[in-house]
Structure formats: structure tokens, C-alpha cells
């Protein structure tokens, strides 16, 4: 059984920073790409960032490029999302997800087969 457990959300003022963490169990973490997605109120879940299994490739949505950074520690089965210069428009529930097969990656939401429970990030003006 694959489980993804997220932590690190909260309330922050605009311009502030937060770090989200997501720990995986039940799959050989070091061979799978990981993604971060978010769902803003009234919108569909959208891609934020992904990192390949060996950290060799990282991709970001245009809306977060230069402000967010994705990383992973395969010794801890954990992926991180460092969020900086946060804006009120970043307010959303953030989800981590694991890709459906090893040694591959894409931004497509449907290609990720297990998801974390989500963590709320609220950015006040």
C-alpha cells in the first residue's frame, strides 16, 4: 500500500516562505518521479512542480518559476517544496503525488497514481 504524508502548510503573509514535505512509503521511492500540484478554490487541480527520481530533472509551472524549488532526499523517502515570495494567489491546497511507473515523468495529473492528503497554504495580503 502506497502512502504519501504531507506536512508544512500554514498561514503566511505575502512575501513570506514555507516548506512543504511529503514522505512516501510502500514504493521504491528512489526510482519514481514526484510531483506537486495545487487546487485553488473553485478551480481544477493544477501542476506546480516535478522532480525526477534522481533529481536530474526539475520542471515548474510558469506561475511559480523562480519562486518555488523542488528537491528530494531519497535516503529519507521525502520530497520537498520550498516556496518563497509567496503571493495571495498561491493560496491553495497543495498535494504531492508519485508517478505511476519508475524512471519516467510528465506533468500530466492523470499520470500520478497515488496522492497525499493535501495541506492548506494560505497567503494573506
Image (cartoon, rainbow, N blue to C red):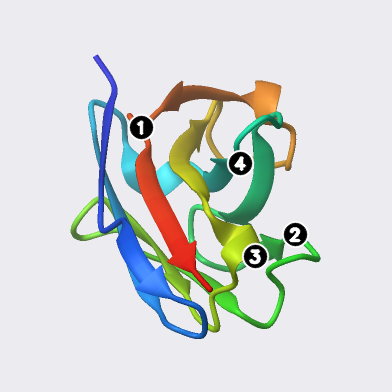
- Using the image as rendered, state which of residue 56 and residue 63 is in the foreground: 63
Q: Quadrant of residue 19?
A: bottom left
Circle 2 residues within 10 Å: few <14, some 14–19, many ≥20: some
- Using the image as rendered, state which of residue 16 and residue 59 is in the foreground: 16
Q: Residue at x 70, y 62 (%)?
A: 59
Could you say whether the residue bearing mark 3 is in a helix, strand or loop? loop
Q: Which label lies toward us, 1 or 3?
A: 1
Contact, mark 4 vs mark 1 (Cβ under 8 Å) = no
Q: Which residue is mark 2?
A: 61
Residue 114 percent coordinates (x, y): 43, 23
Precedes in sequence: disc 2 or disc 4: 4
- Left or right of 57: which side holds 82? left
Precedes in sequence: disc 4 or disc 1: 4
Q: Which label lies toward us, 2 or 3?
A: 2
Q: CA distance from mark 2 to mark 4?
A: 14 Å
Q: Which residue is mark 1?
A: 116
From this view, report whether residue 82 is shown above or below residue 48. Answer: below
Quadrant holding the N terminus: top left
Could you say whether the residue bearing mark 2 is in a helix, strand or loop? loop
Q: Which mark is residue 40?
A: 4
Amino acid at each position: 500500500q502506497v502512502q504519501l504524508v504531507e506536512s508544512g502548510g500554514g498561514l503566511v503573509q505575502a512575501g513570506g516562505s514555507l516548506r512543504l514535505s511529503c514522505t512516501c512509503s510502500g514504493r521504491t521511492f528512489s526510482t519514481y518521479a514526484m510531483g506537486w500540484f495545487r487546487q485553488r478554490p473553485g478551480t481544477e487541480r493544477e501542476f506546480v512542480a516535478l522532480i525526477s527520481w534522481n533529481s536530474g530533472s526539475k520542471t515548474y509551472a510558469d506561475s511559480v518559476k523562480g519562486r518555488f524549488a523542488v528537491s528530494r532526499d531519497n535516503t529519507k523517502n521525502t520530497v520537498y517544496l520550498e516556496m518563497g515570495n509567496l503571493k495571495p494567489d498561491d493560496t491553495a491546497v497543495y498535494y504531492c503525488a508519485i508517478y505511476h511507473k519508475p524512471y519516467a515523468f510528465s506533468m500530466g495529473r492523470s499520470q500520478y497514481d497515488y496522492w497525499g492528503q493535501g495541506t492548506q497554504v494560505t497567503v494573506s495580503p
